[in-house]
Amino acid sequence: MTDPYLHADAEARAQARGLIDTARYGALAVLQPGGLTPSVSRIALATDAQGMPVSLISSLSAHTAALETTPACALLIGEPGGKGDPLTHPRLTLHCIAQLITRGTSEHDTLRARYLALRPKAGLYADFGDFRFVRFIVTDGLLNAGFGRAVRLSAKDLAA
Amino acid sequence: MTDPYLHADAEARAQARGLIDTARYGALAVLQPGGLTPSVSRIALATDAQGMPVSLISSLSAHTAALETTPACALLIGEPGGKGDPLTHPRLTLHCIAQLITRGTSEHDTLRARYLALRPKAGLYADFGDFRFVRFIVTDGLLNAGFGRAVRLSAKDLAA
């Protein structure tokens, strides 16, 4: 079968970066613990100083338990608004390794300061004991910019 | 750890059914072939006559190859609009087994008639040779109806 994905060009790289930089939330796909079945949930998103996706997640959530067992995961970002055909709206799949950040470390403090500056409302729960930051180390991505325009992107293509 | 999920009640069942019945699209989580890493992509959605999620997907897409290898998958539906806090918007995770429908069967024809009645624009590509219907057999679900309101639902709770 011919690979239907295009190679990344400057336009695709810029579009992907734009989606990462503006994403307020996304769909997180994980492997469920103890099995080979995926799950998917919505999480809030911002970026770290290197432009990589970051979230603030609760240990009470099933996705956090899943990431503790299997850090390989995927994010879908680029959400349609209420109007128009959702399948023509550009979106980006990012394959990632999740890195859970221990509370009280300097890395936590650095991420917390930036995250709360970008997402002030997260101050309501950022300091609850069950919440931790998670950084997503992106390994590769797939940009779908509408029917027939699907592009493979490397980690380098996706760097800020 | 205490299970933070609530038991389903009539309100949660009705809310979950409403999300399934009105979903135009969702995030599909799959296992990538040849590995233990998840991926996630956006797909169009409608329902079959039994009220279960149905999509029309291309064999050229990575998610179709993934479902052919591992039919266990998950859907996230219930998309926020452009306004408000996306994490207070109700959404539903469905754990599913994907059933790919062979073109030219009576089952294909039945699904095609209903799908095109519900999603007329899909007529543009429904008859392309690489497109097939997929039905999602729901095994269980998680409804997240906002902060602190997470509900487990069985297949029976989610039936139409």
Image (spheres, coloured by chain):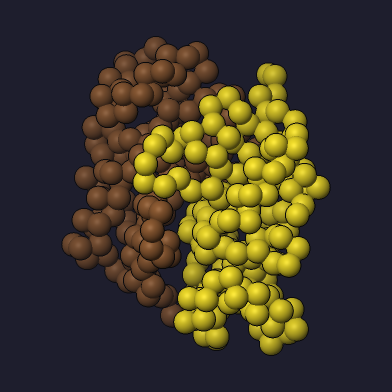
Chain colours: A yellow, B brown
Q: Nearer the viewer, residue B150 or B116?
A: B116
The outermost residue toward the left is: B10
The outermost residue toward the right is: A156
In this picture, residue B5 sits left or right of residue A56: left
**Residue B106 visible in this rendered orientation of the protein:** yes
Q: Position of residue A98 (x, y in %)?
A: 68, 62
**Residue B71 visible in this rendered orientation of the protein:** no
Instruction: Name which residue lies at 25% across and 24% down.
Output: B117
Instruction: Name which residue lies at 33% across and 43% down.
Output: B23
Q: Position of residue A145 (x, y in %)?
A: 58, 35
Residue B151 to residue B117: above or below:
below
Quarter in which the C terminus of chain B is drawn: top left
Q: Nearer the viewer, residue A8 or A128?
A: A8
Instruction: Name which residue lies at 70% across and 37% down.
Output: A11
Instruction: Name which residue lies at 18% across and 62% down.
Output: B10
Q: Position of residue B37 (x, y in %)?
A: 66, 49
Q: Nearer the viewer, residue B125 or A123?
A: A123
Residue B34 to residue B123: above or below:
below
Residue B23 to residue A74: above or below:
above
The image shows a total of numbered marks equal to: 0
Q: Position of residue B115 (x, y in %)?
A: 31, 26
Residue A112 to residue B102: above or below:
below
Q: Nearer the viewer, residue A113 or B25?
A: A113
Residue A1 sits in quarter:
top right
